[in-house]
Image (cartoon, rainbow, N blue to C red):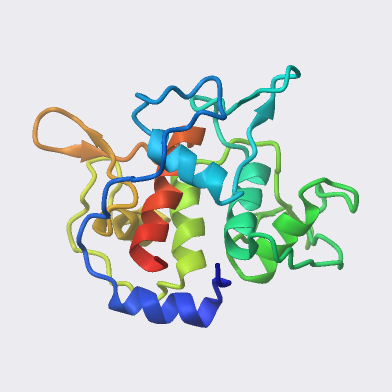
Amino acid sequence: MTRRTAPFLAAVALLATALAPPAATAAPVTQFTDVPDTYPFVGAIAWMADEGITTGYDNGNGTFSFRPSDPVLREQISAFLYRYQWRNDGDQYPGPSGFTDVAENHRFKHHIQWMAAYGITTGYDNGNGTKSFRPSAPVLREQVAAFFYRYVGMSGYTPPATSPFVDVPTTHTFYREIAWAEHYGIARGYDNGNGTFSFRPSQPVLREQAAAFMFRMDQLFVS
């Protein structure tokens, strides 16, 4: 598996089309006790496990669970993206984290620092010249759209004049990123049942949703 470098991702992204990604073809997840073979996101979750992006939670009896309905924390999404980028190569960032709430011994310090170094995250302005990351806070759907957009390197994307989601106006801070995610089928939103869709930008991303988003991104821009 080759590394995902920023120039490579940007070049591939420019060639991508708006076609929906192919359906997941990974083998059924048998290593997670709470993800049966019939689970809707079984393919994407299996892919994450097979690629070493997630190890799940140790049940303490030799088995593991994925907790698909749990929200993803900001520190966890940093780990997912970091592992996706480097796999077993393990690139390191030995310097300071750059965030006041990410200690030098924080277990995800390198992952978070990597995101900051590549401009994938900017953190939160503390108002005194410092920034925080809020690693234990749930990552929101709008934030994941922004993280993935920056990771792929789609800075030149022009969003449509009309929003694809009724709850994301074109003036939304992350409108470009959310519209991009919808355009390429990475995040498909929620069917309102009346011909419209909502994105629910301020809701936390669930672990099963993060698996689906990452799988679709990989299929479109990297595979």
Can you see residue 97? yes
Give the residue at x 74% y 61%.
Answer: 113
- Residue 40 sits in quarter: top left
Residue 37: image location, x then y, percent: 39, 26
Q: Is residue 112 left or right of residue 202?
A: right
Instruction: Tell me: residue 160, above or below residue 136.
Output: below
Give the residue at x 62% y 38%.
Answer: 73
Can you see residue 210? no
- Nearest the viewer among 100 and 48 is 48
Quarter of the image that includes the C terminus: bottom left
Q: Residue furthest left?
A: 195
Instruction: Tell me: residue 90, above or below residue 198.
Output: below
Q: Is residue 193 left or right of residue 60?
A: left
Q: Residue furthest top?
A: 61
Residue 119: image location, x then y, percent: 60, 69
Instruction: Tell me: residue 187, above or below residue 73.
Output: below
Give the residue at x 27% y 44%.
Answer: 188
- Residue 6 sits in quarter: bottom right
Residue 99: image location, x then y, percent: 78, 56
